[in-house]
Amino acid sequence: MAEILEPDVNFIKQIRGLGGASLKVCYQCATCSTVCPLSTDDNPFPRREMIWAQWGLKDRLIKDPNIWLCHQCNDCCKYCPRGARPGDVMAALRAYCISEYAVPKFLAKWLQDKRYLPVLLAIPVIWFLFIIAVTTGFHIPKGEEIDLAEFIPVIWGVDLTFIPLSVLVIISFAMSISRFWRDMKRVNLTPEQIAARGGWLNIIITPIKEILAHQRFSKCGVKKTRFYFHFLILWGFVGLAIVTALVFFRMDILGIHGHISMKNPIKWLANLAGLSLLLGSLILLSDRISDKETPSTYFDWSLVILVLSLAVTGFLTEFLRLGGLAGLACFFYFLHLVSVFYLIAYLPFSKLAHLVYRTVVMIYERYEGGI
Amino acid sequence: MEKKIGVYICTGCGIGDSLDIERLSKVATEEFNVPICKTHAFLCGEEGLRLIKEDINKEGVNTVLIAGCSPRVNWDVFNFGTNIIVERANIREMVVWSHPPGEDTQELAEDYLRMGIARAEKVEIPEGYMPEEEYNKTILVVGGGISGMTAALEAAKANYQVVIVEKQAKLGGWAAKWAKQFPKHPPYQMLEDTGISSKIKEVEANSNIKVYTSTTVKKVEGQPGAFNVILSQNGKEEGIKVGSIILATGWKPYDPTRLEHLGYGRCSNVITNIQMEEMAAEGRITRPSDGRPAESVVFIQCAGQRDPEHLPYCSSVCCLVSLKQAMYVRERNPNAKVYIIYRDMRTPGQYEMFYKKAQDDENIFLTKGDIVGVTEDGDKSVIVEVDNTLLGEKISIKADLVVLATGMVSTLEGIPNTIEEVYAQYGLTGEEEVAKIKEVIASKPQPWEGVLNLDYRQGPEVPFLQSSSLKKLSDFPDSNFICFPYESRRTGIYVAGCVRQPMDMDAAIKDATGAALKAIQCMELESRGRTVHPRSLDLSYPIFFLQRCTQCKRCTMECPFSALEEDEKGTPKPNLFRCRRCGICMGACPERIIGFKDYNVDIISSMIKAINVPYEDEEPKFRILCFACENDAYPALDMAGINHLSYDVSLRVIPVRCLGSVNMVFISDALSRGIDGILLLGCVLGDDYQCHFVRGSELANYRLGKVGETLQRLALEAERVHMEQVTITDYYKLPKIINEFVEKVKEIGANPFKGF
């Protein structure tokens, strides 16, 4: 006899709350599977995931790699005759999955509940206020060349904040992803099979190349704009990550302190990446506002606002510093650091965690199928 | 009546351009010596009509033959009062619009004119069949459920006297047992009150309605306008007289004891949707085993339905019933889980909104699937095993309660409705002597409980749908489901509600309203000497020249409406208010003693004889006769003309009321006259028949099978006679059908009887 099913009604309620309100009205016509580029004969995506969700089959869904392969092009939402919006349900499932695998779990709950926003913001605010108080004592730098390190020392405010934070984030991700991988894994490859797939290096590198090139996004039918903003934001982050690494090298290894000249190629890259982030987040914002059909949850909005604030506070700090308005420059630098803290510390719990989950699933896809 | 024929040839609509009108006129004036023959370019116009009217008034013309457009058009224009016979020769649609000008087309037009004049000479004005005694206009409604009560109220509102006969002690039927009904108002999401109690009050308060409860119909004899009905109320009999009958006895649930494979009878917590509804009406949803509230309920759809082993059809309401009952469960218990295992969810029309609403409930789970096992657990819970689910796997569900969505069965099911079935009930074959049969039947009480118990020659109930071989195809009364749903094969008896087709309350209300209208129409038409659907308003009726009857019983057996009873010897006794004027008896009679004043064997034979069959030519000119049913085939031929589709010019068309009225004597008459082939165009026959008289084209097909012998005696090929089934929309296929048949006849060669 087959296993006795026990639908998890609480799970259904949570998915509905995370932007999948329409999930129950799906009547399984499979129009979504017909239009979805991910769907195959033996994998009727997202039709089958929809009924799993309707039946509250949480265990099947959280380890389902398909929900992560979906790039929410929303062709399914456009063609669904019932208004069940499968694409949005998949997004809600992803949000659920992030909180399900999060370590520690309570942080994920906080990230999905706007009541905890003050707490989440208070942590970096208090931290940086504390740092400033004990180091410079709120000293506003003066002179022609404003050095913000005089307001917050780099070693305390940046290095000793973000390096330990990153380590914690990596540990958190490692714990989440190893559980996720175990749950997701349906096959165990022999070393020969792995070699046949070009070895682990190839299994890992190929999907990353694909992600950087945005090959799957370019297949989206309904939402062309997704390609642009996602491309700009991702490359913005990549550029800023490189800049951060270079600055770290220059400062902490080479020991060159002070702001980098505008003529320096590192500064060019930083501004270009920042511009890319700003432009991308603005397109994303206008897309969210103009799209009346797709429900946007707090979980979605918080990421949009975060990315935008990163770019805006970054540029404002730079311009104000160059313009000699030291007080304001310090203020926005403070906000910028809070934003960066929010971004990095809460990465495994926010919507941005898809960066890791989706990459892992795409790696798994190659691992399992060798595609 | 001394006839004075006037022939009027219209030259409009292209007729004058294609034909030699002078030559055509000579057919009337020289061949037939018609006293008046005139031509006009616009006969249906004011001036043309004045021309005819002047001849009627001044010249004493009383029989007008219009050679021009089809009889299907302008029949209202060419109406000169009840005393003037108007005949039509269709030389527009069937001649000039479907054939290019030329000698052959000229001959075709001349033949149509000859047939028209031959007919005009023989036709008499029908005067209508008037009742001998006063035509009773009371309506008997059998069944006091939602359909019966609606029909009664609708008829009563139109000021007709109505008698409702209800078997149960109270009015209301099944609907009175329901807790709620499906949403009927926007936004079609909330269950509604059935409203049945206010309907019962309305019926009881209506002074035009007399209600008999705890009463059954013991016997119905007679005919519309004069049905003698014997009612039986608690063993007490009462005779009443009614004009028409509405049969609304509704449905019974499918026998669940046959659903053991779904756990019924085997597991104590497996019930039917009827039991569920009764529980809900009592205000509880509990497990029968221990009376504990049901926390999880599984609905199994199509239980014993859409299954050749059980009911082969869909009862159309069970999906909605289960959704409704799922709502009952959810309203009573906020934590209860409801599972619906369906084959296809069928929620037509606005009910889709209700389906969507039910689906949106977090605790209602639906999937398509096949039930592979229903077993009982230790604590009397039921484990339902489902395969081929949409979840992509085989699943098991543990339920406190399993509800089987069983279907609707007509209350006529299992009741003998043909005379053969009646004989079988008494152990008779029907071959016995009449006196013996009567004796056996009188000797013991009726072994079954009938519904109408008609004292009709062909059987005691309205007939079911039959296949060509008279095999019963369903347990529902035969009617055309699309075109005339309320008709039964018993004139004056109309069928409404679930007794004729599973339906929901809304549909039953519409159905009952329609049936009430049909019953009223029947009584109003017949009391004026006119016939009912489908020849509504026709004044003609069959006349039987019984002195020459040989008691062969073909007419009494073949009449689709059991209009003819028999006396002891087997001589037909017509009940003309049961008759629909199709002429199937006329086609059946080997003695040719049945006919109508304007449609009989003599008229048709004269028309056949009027066709000019040339034989002198070395190259023989073929002549093909076509009998076309007036209902579909003839209009289709007209439409072919309207669309200027061309077909073989040798075809001569005679319209007939029904192919069933084609007497086989027409075939031998035509062939012995030298006609080369005969094509019968009639309605579709078989399970999906479209014959307006139910069995006409079926019978024509059957008789043609027998005519082969006659042809062999004449040393003629059986292939010269052919029947085709056409629907009205098949007009574009007609040229191919006709030309292929003509080609086949040409291959066989000319009729050797030409010139004899």
Image (cartoon, coloured by chain):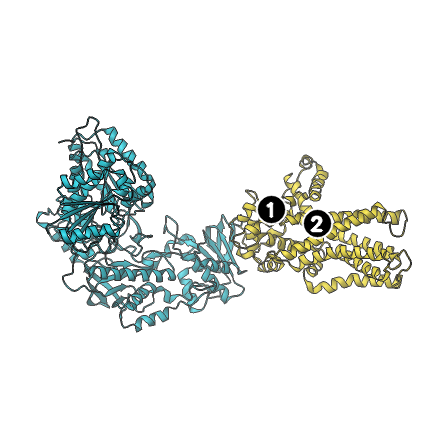
Chain colours: A yellow, B cyan
Residue nearer the viewer, B24 or B74:
B24
Lower sequence index among marks 2 and 1: 1
Vertical arrangement, residue A246 with respect to residue B438, above or below: above
Viewport quadrant of the C terminus of chain A: top right
- How far across and how far down the image is residue B442, in percent? 16, 58
Dot 2 lies on which element?
Answer: helix
Q: Disc 1: which chain?
A: A
Dot 1 lies on which element?
Answer: loop
* Amino acid bearing label 1: Gly
Residue nearer the viewer, B69 or B578:
B69
| Residue ranking furthest to the left | B547
Q: Quadrant of residue B259?
A: bottom left
Vertical arrangement, residue B486 with respect to residue B113, above or below: below
- How far across and how far down the image is residue A276, in percent? 74, 49
Find disc 2 in the rendering and name its residue.
Answer: A355
Residue nearer the viewer, B166 or B694:
B694
Q: Disc 2: which chain?
A: A
- How far across and how far down the image is residue B287, in percent? 46, 63
Classify residue B152 as left or right of residue B439.
right
Vertical arrangement, residue B168 with respect to residue B299, above or below: below
- How far across and how far down the image is residue B62, in percent? 15, 51
Q: Residues within 10 Å of mark 1 (few under 14, many from 20)?
A: some
| Front label number (2 vs 1) | 1
Residue nearer the viewer, B461 or B736:
B736
Alpha carbon distance from label 2 to label 1: 22 Å
| Residue ranking furthest to the front | B47
Find disc 1 in the rendering and name its residue.
Answer: A221
Q: Which mark is residue B366?
A: none
* Amino acid bearing label 2: Leu
Q: Same subunit under labels 2 and 1?
A: yes
Q: Residues within 10 Å of mark 2 (few under 14, many from 20)?
A: few
Residue B648 in sight? yes
